[in-house]
Amino acid sequence: MDQPLSKDLIARICELEEEKETLRHHYEKRIKTSLTKYRRVIDATSEGFLELDLDFRIVDYNTTIVELTGISGDNLMNCPVESLYDRDTVFVHFASKDHLSFEAILNTTSDQKLNLLFKRSILRDNDGNLNGYLVFFTDLTDLKNAQEDLLRAETRYRDIYNNAVQGMYQCSLDGNFLRINPAFAKIFGYDQTSHLLSQAGGVTTLYKDPESRQNLISVLQEHQLVTNYEVEMQDRNGQPVWVLINARLTQDPHGPPLIDGILIDNTKKRLAADKLRRSRERFRHLANHDSLTGLFNTRYLYKALDKMILESIESKDPFSLVFLDMDNFKHVVDTYGHLNGSQALKEVADTLKAGLSGASFGVAYGGDEFVLVLPHTGKNAALDHVQNIRMLMKKTVYLTKQELKVHMSASFGVATYPDDAKDSAGLLALADEAMFRIKSCGKDAVGVSQKNEAGS
C-alpha cells in the first residue's frame, strides 16, 4: 500500500508547478515579443517577403509584398508563389539549391509589370530536414530605369562620336591609339578606322614634324589642357593636313595617363590664308617692282631717292644715279620679234642684278631704259662700277635658250648727289642728259653730267 505524500512534499510540488507556470508565461511573453519584433522588422523592410511551405505555397508575407502586388493578404495565403511572376520570362525549380536568386517580372493587380530580384533560401529544422522556404523580393525598377538611361546615353554618345564632323581620338603619351572616330580617319585619308588603328606608330606617324607633337605633350604635361593648337600633319599619302587640336591629359586610375582630343581639319582655311598672304605679298611686290624684269619700278625709285637725299644731307655721304638705254634695241625686236625682245630685257635685268652689289639696286624705267642707284658711291667709284657692268653686258650672250646668240650693249649716263644736283628730279635729268650725249656720240659708253665726261 502506497504511503501518503507528506504535506511538505505536496507543498514543494505545488511550488514547482507555480514556478513552471511562471516560466511558461515568461517564455511565451519573450516568444511573443520576439515574434512581434520579427513581424515589425519584416513589415518595415523595403523588400517584399514570403514564407513558403514545402509545396511552394505562401504561408506568411509582409506588407511590402501586398503593396507591390496589390493582392490582399487573404488572397496571398496558400497561393502558389509561381502565380506571382511571369514564368514566360524565367522558370525556376525552387528545390534545386539552398540559396537561389534570379530576376523576373512580378504580376500586379494593376497590370503593371515590375522588375524584381527574387532571393530564395531554404528553411531547415534542427535535424537539417527541409522545412520550407523564405523569399525576398527587391524592386529593380529604378535600377532598370537607370540602366536604360545609361544605355540610351551610351548609344547617343556613340552616335555623336561616330557621326561627328570633328576628329575624335584617345591615345597614350607614346602615341598608340586606343580609339578614333570615322571623322578622324577620314581627315587623314583612311576609309576605315581599323586601317589607322592598326598602323604602327599610331598618331606619331601623322605629324609632319615630330617636334610639334613633343611640344604638344610638353604643354599637356604642364597644363593638362591645350586649345586650338595648330599644327601641320600629313595624310596617308604624305599630303599636308593643317589641324586645330583641343586635347586634355586624363589620368587613368588603372594605368598611365591618356590623351583625349578633338581635331578640327583646318587645311582649307589655312591654304586659303596662305594663298591670301601670297597674293598680298605679290601685290606688295608688284606695287614696287616691274612685272617683266623683277627690278624695282619708278614708284619705288622716287620714294627711295627722296629718302636717300635726306640721309645724305645728314651723313654728308654722296650717292650716284645711272641712266642707261639699250643700244639698237629696236633692231633686236624687229629681227627676233616682240616676245624675244621682252625675254632679252629680262636677261639684261639679270645682268644688271649680277653687276650690282650691297645696297645698290636697279629700276625698270620704261621700255628699254633702266636706272641704277648706287648708295654711298661718289662719281669716280660710280664710273668704275658702271664700266664693269657695261663690260659684263658686252660679254653676255642673250637668248641662248631660244637658240639665238644675241649680243647687246647700252649707253650710260652718271650723275652724283649732291655734286650735280640738289633734288631727285634734277639728278635724273642730268643722268638722262649725260646718257643722251653718249647716245649721240657713238653709243656703248659711259658719260657723266656737267663738265666731267668719260667714255669708252
Image: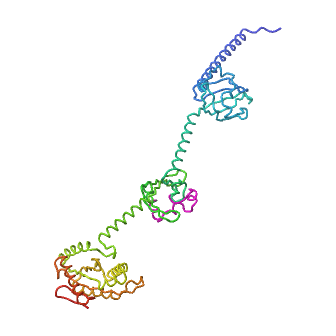
* Nearer-the-camera pick, 2 or 19: 19
Give x and y (percent) for residue 133. Answer: 69, 29
* Nearer-the-camera pick, 13 or 164: 164
Looking at the image, can residue 422 be seen? yes
The quarter of the rendered structure image containing the C terminus is bottom left
Q: Is residue 449 magenta?
A: no
In this rendering, position of residue 211 left or right of residue 422: right
Give x and y (percent) for residue 442. Answer: 25, 90
Q: Does residue 300 lie above or below 410 as drawn?
A: above
* Nearer-the-camera pick, 338 or 415: 338
Report the predominant secondary structure element of the magenta stretch: helix
Q: Does residue 65 lie above or below 264 as drawn?
A: above
In this rendering, position of residue 106 left or right of residue 230: right
Give x and y (percent) for residue 447. Answer: 22, 87
Residue appearing at x 18%, y 88% in the figure: 452
Looking at the image, can residue 41 be seen? no
Res 109 quadrant in image: top right
Give x and y (percent) for residue 162. Answer: 53, 50
The quarter of the rendered structure image containing the N terminus is top right
In this rendering, position of residue 117 left or right of residue 251: right
Farthest residue, direction front: 334
Farthest residue, direction right: 1
In this rendering, position of residue 35 left or right of residue 456: right
Q: Is residue 198 magenta?
A: yes
Please state the extent of the stretch shown in magenta in the rendering. 187-216
